[in-house]
Amino acid sequence: MLTAFTFPGQGAQRSGMLTQLPKTEAAAARVHEAESVLGQAIHTLDTAEALKDTRNVQLSLLISGVTWGEHLKQQSCKPDFVLGLSIGAYPAAVVAGILNFSDALRLVALRGQLMQQAYPSGYGMLALTGASRSAIEKVINKQREQGREVFLANLNAEQQFVLAGERAALLESVEQLKASVPCAGQMLDVPVPSHCELLSEQAQELEAAFAEVQLSSSSCRYVSATRARVLRSVEDICRDLAQNMALQTHWQDSCQMLAERGLERVIEMPPGNSLTGLFRRVLPGGICKALQSEIN
């Protein structure tokens, strides 16, 4: 049965998420490794207060994704594909054996710091449903002509998108869309403008840090959600990991590509569940489940 593991991005985090890690020696070893590399206890990462910081959010998602993904593999449930949304690409690469966990911790800590420092306030991401891509792009182009920073960041499903940019411009874009089409918008729990050119400089700085990291090949296929294709060379995967914060995400196309390859089962790692719903739209006859629903 062709299987994919999916790993959620920022916005899926929840307070206390790391208290739900598997109760196994292997998971405990990963926690010990994380605490040694970071120089702090993991319970300091996922409190409600700590999760206001992008670095802590991304590290929490990395640790959760890796421990749960490896836990499933130890139970003989091995993925043929791994696919992560934004920061989710990092635990995907670790579970696939492409990226060393300790290296991932250091890189993700840097990634979160770069993003947080670049946009400490006034920016974010907004989920938008009910409007077509053409209608959204028309409003965005008008906003950009007026000097506002707003971008189409994620293409998640038919009439389900995510915008990134200035908070005020995001909210204004929704109001303009509502004047012409029935739609709804909601700010996400993501305080930085990911998946657009606003993070290009930070992505370049992160890519430079990858020069000190050795990636490995893997028989498990790594799917790039920014390119909607399987990447095989470690050079391509390295570039994808470093640059994905500044690149538009094509989640729907990635799901469709895997469905066309004969994918039969998708399992989303905790704490996420929204990716499962998106996959069901393109894989109605397959098995799509979120582990979070089993551990609540």
Image: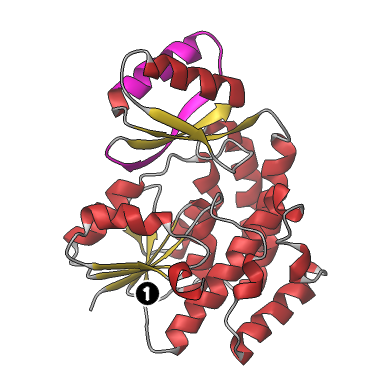
In depth, the one of 270 and 243 nearer the eye is 270
Is 152 magenta? The answer is yes
**Residue 237 location, x and y as percent?**
46, 59
Which residue sits at x=35%, y=68%? 289
Residue 180 placement, left or right of 162: left
Which residue sits at x=56%, y=76%? 67
**Residue 13 location, x and y as percent?**
59, 56
Residue 65 placement, left or right of 213: left
Q: Residue placed farthest to the top in the image?
A: 146
**Magenta segment range?**
135-158
Q: Mark 1 Cα within 10 Å, few/some/many (few <14, many 20+)?
A: some
Residue 280 placement, left or right of 97: left
Q: Is residue 236 above or below residue 128?
A: below
What sort of colour scheme is used for the picture? secondary structure
Which residue sits at x=56%, y=28%? 165
Is 254 magenta? The answer is no
Q: Residue placed farthest to the right in the image?
A: 39
Per the image, label 1 sits on a secondary structure element best described as loop
Task: Read off the residue under disc 1.
Answer: 220
Q: Quadrant of residue 157?
A: top left
Give the amino acid at mark 1: Cys
Numbered circles on residues, count: 1
Q: Is residue 21 above or below residue 110?
A: below
Is residue 204 in sight in this rendering?
A: yes
In depth, the one of 152 and 162 nearer the eye is 162
Q: Is residue 207 above or below residue 115?
A: below
In depth, the one of 269 and 32 nearer the eye is 269
**Residue 112 location, x and y as percent?**
68, 50
Is residue 214 in sight in this rendering?
A: no
